Image (cartoon, rainbow, N blue to C red):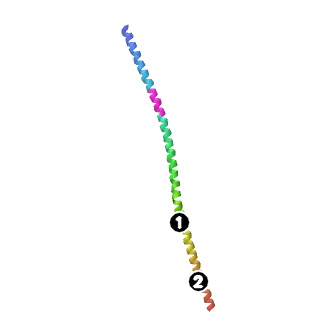
Amino acid sequence: MDNIESIVVRHDEKIKVHDEKLNSHENQINDLKSVTSVIYELSANMNNLIEQMKEMKKDISEIKFEPLNEQKATKRKVIDTIITTLVGALVGGAIALVVMYIKMS
């Protein structure tokens, strides 16, 4: 009988040890779940930041090229003005020559 009681006592002790280990593992699993949740949240935030950075990069590119576009437009206006002035002078000169030719005839 002592032998059976001894076996039962050792068995109960082993059960207690295993219960403690299970409780410890359960706590570790819960900790891992929490960490996993935080990692998913961080991943989502990183994706949002990446999208925002892409938009900012696009905006910066537009802002960077805006002065260049304005410069091109101004240059085009100057060229148009010069061409218009030259054409106007040539037409005015041609008209003046025609008028002189008519007066001389």
Magenta stretch?
25-34
Q: Is residue 80 above or below residue 49?
A: below
Q: Is residue 88 above or below residue 39?
A: below
| Residue at 50% from the left image edge and 44% from the top image edge | 47
Q: Is residue 33 magenta?
A: yes
**Circle on res. 94:** 2
Where's residue 58, x and y in %?
51, 54
| Residue at 39% from the left image edge and 15% from the top image edge | 11
Disc 1 residue type (three-letter): Lys
Say which quadrant the N terminus sits in.
top left
Q: Secondary structure at mark 1?
A: helix
Where's residue 2, x and y in %?
37, 8
Q: Is residue 87 left or right of residue 8?
A: right
Q: Secondary structure at mark 2?
A: helix
Q: Is residue 83 above or below residue 28?
A: below
Say which quadrant the C terminus sits in.
bottom right
Q: Is residue 11 magenta?
A: no
Label 2 vs label 1, nearer the camera: 1
Q: Residue lying farthest bottom?
A: 105
Q: Is residue 19 above or below residue 81?
A: above
Disc 2 residue type (three-letter): Ala
Residue picked out by circle 1 = 72
Which class describes the residues within 10 Å of circle 1: few (<14), some (14-19), or many (20+)? few
Distance of label 2 from label 1 (alpha carbons): 33 Å
Q: How many marks?
A: 2
The picture quadrant where one finds residue 13 is top left
| Residue at 45% from the left image edge and 29% from the top image edge | 29
